[in-house]
Image (spheres, helix red, strand yellow):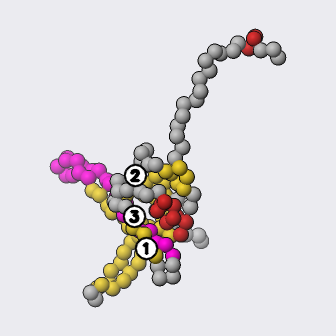
């Protein structure tokens, strides 16, 4: 039986991604992503609950995200595998849940560049209006 482990998150970047190199020379890029949920409490008041997700990108995906110079508040669609890392701090075992990012898409319209998160960062294309024909030609005027 095949198993499936993928998370898809739509949220806002918490702050500028942080780049670090591992001792073996691999690039690791960490960022936090905020997702929000709106609901009504027992009194009928609307509330908002924000969840913070720890995201990690490696290799070409990390290079792409770093090249985009993203700032906090940028809307992103992130896909990746849910991972768990455990370590000991002050004698207590701590488990950290992370999204190992495989793909990222920028959703903020004002972004200067766009990328698909697979190592392909490309400048955003300017949207130029199609040239309008000044004097339309009637089909009967064509010589063929």
Q: Is residue 82 visible?
A: no
Give residue 94's position: percent from left, percent from top: 33, 80
Quarter of the rendering containing residue 49: bottom left
Residue under pointer 3: 17
Q: Where does the magenta region start and end?
A: 26-48
Between discs 2 and 1, the one toward the N terminus: 1
Q: Alpha carbon of mark 1 to alpha carbon of mark 3: how far?
A: 10 Å
Q: Residue at x 74, y 14 (%)?
A: 139
Q: Which residue is mark 2?
A: 75
Residue 39 x, y percent position in the rendering: 27, 50
The answer to whether any part of residue 128 appears in the image is yes
* Label annotation for residue 61: none
Q: Mark 1: which secondary structure?
A: strand
Residue 107 horizontal/vertical position (percent): 44, 49
Q: How far apart are the alpha carbons under marks 2 and 1? A: 23 Å
* Residue at x 19% of width, y 47% of height: 45
Q: Residue reaching furthest right?
A: 144
- SS at mark 3 in the image: loop
């Amino acid at each position: 039986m095949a198993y499936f482990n993928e998370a898809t998150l739509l949220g806002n970047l918490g702050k500028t991604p942080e780049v670090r190199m591992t001792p073996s020379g691999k690039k690791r890029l960490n960022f936090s992503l905020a997702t929000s949920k709106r609901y009504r409490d027992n009194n009928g008041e609307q509330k908002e609950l924000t969840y913070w997700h720890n995201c990690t990108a490696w290799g070409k995906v990390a290079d792409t995200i770093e090249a985009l110079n993203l700032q906090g508040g940028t809307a992103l669609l992130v896909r990746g595998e849910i991972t768990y890392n455990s370590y000991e701090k002050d004698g207590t075992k701590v488990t950290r849940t992370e999204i190992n990012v495989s793909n990222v898409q920028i959703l903020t319209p004002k972004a200067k560049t766009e990328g698909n998160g697979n190592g392909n960062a490309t400048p955003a294309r300017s949207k130029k209006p199609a040239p309008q024909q000044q004097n339309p030609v009637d089909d009967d005027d064509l010589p063929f």
